[in-house]
Amino acid sequence: MVNSGNTKVMVSGCFDILHGGHVEFFRQAKSLGDHLTVCVASDDVLMSYKGKKSSLPMLHKVRLIESIDCVDKVITSSDLDNVLDFATYARQNKPDIVAVTTDDMNADAKETFCDEIGASLVVLPKSIDIASISTSELISKLKAPVSVPLRVDLAGGWLDVPRYAVDNAFIVNCAIDIFASIKEWPVEKRSGLGGSAAWAILNGKNPVDSELNLGVGWQDPAVIQETGLCVWRSGPMPVLECKCNPDWLEHLALYYTGIDHDTPHIANNKRDYKLIEEAGLTAMKAVVRRDLAGLHKAVRQSYNAQLVEGMKTLPEYGEAAKKYCGGGWGGYALYMFKKTDEIPDEMIKIKGYMMA
């Protein structure tokens, strides 16, 4: 577009938490003309459009955007409209250009409006010189916890993977008193304790989506966020059947096999899902009854299914029930002893954890 020397450009948006991507957008928009007006969604529009309160008082947002050298004027919504909240102002002040970014889902409606008032719609690339980030991502990072518990799975593993889900089947798992953070990871990584889900949570990502995108299941983020000893229904997304305090889940320990664990790479292995389903049912009944012996039985059933899949036998420690954690083939193994003094020194003693 040829600059006539008095070209007025307008942009609109929520701009709820101002970041570098917004500044880059303003700079690109200003380069299209001589005068840039930024319309900031009012609190009412933000609530209607995003369903949330403003992160900053409106006057603070206006002052911040006014301080950017490429911005000539800042206004707030002239209309209570989720898309064209600037319509009345634009009709009165006749911008030559309305600029949007490539990911603007309302670009078509804005283009129709531009045709109505005799303006041009220009679509700009998003964040051409810095990594793209959204306000929602920033808020998620701010809300992310400092630390999260890891987890052990007891029975029904793989039935949380949508493609392997079975109607009326159950997955049983438990958060444990080992906490991970961005700075501190007290156990081996890639070890079957739900580490990838924990990492997603710590970084403010949607952990269920993150795990499903890896081609695995949702049980890790589900129990890490829920905590406690949990029974889940098999299916495409987490549905909690029941939950209890794991204070009766005694004498647990972790044994490290010395081999890395990588669930996505073994997700398509052949395995006996009927055995896995039976173990999950046994574990569900045991949790409901607070039956420790029944839970030991479910763990043994899970281990038998792992042996059928082809995993190496784990070391015997008396009559302790045992199984590989997560998808198995390495990482940690869970051992359930009858007495605390039976736990060998080389193992990590753990307890179930439930947030108060």
Image: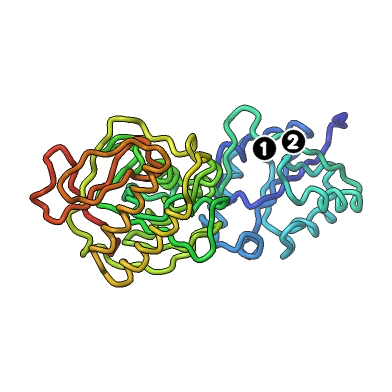
**What colour scheme does the image use?**
rainbow
How busy is the neighbourhood of tag 2: few (under 14 within 10 Å), some, or many (20 plus)? some
Q: How many marks?
A: 2
**260 sits left or right of 27 in the view:** left
- Say above or below: 166 vs 108: below
Which quarter of the image is occupied by the N terminus?
top right
Q: Nearer the viewer, residue 258 or 226?
A: 258
Q: What element carries label 2?
A: strand
Q: Residue 25 carries which label?
A: 1
x, y percent for residue 205: 49, 46
Q: Quadrant of residue 64?
A: top right
Q: Nearer the viewer, residue 31 or 232?
A: 232
How busy is the neighbourhood of tag 1: few (under 14 within 10 Å), some, or many (20 plus)? some
Q: Which residue is rendered at x = 37% and y = 55% of the image? A: 155
Which quarter of the image is occupied by the C terminus?
bottom left
Q: Which residue is rendered at x = 73% and y = 36% of the image? A: 29
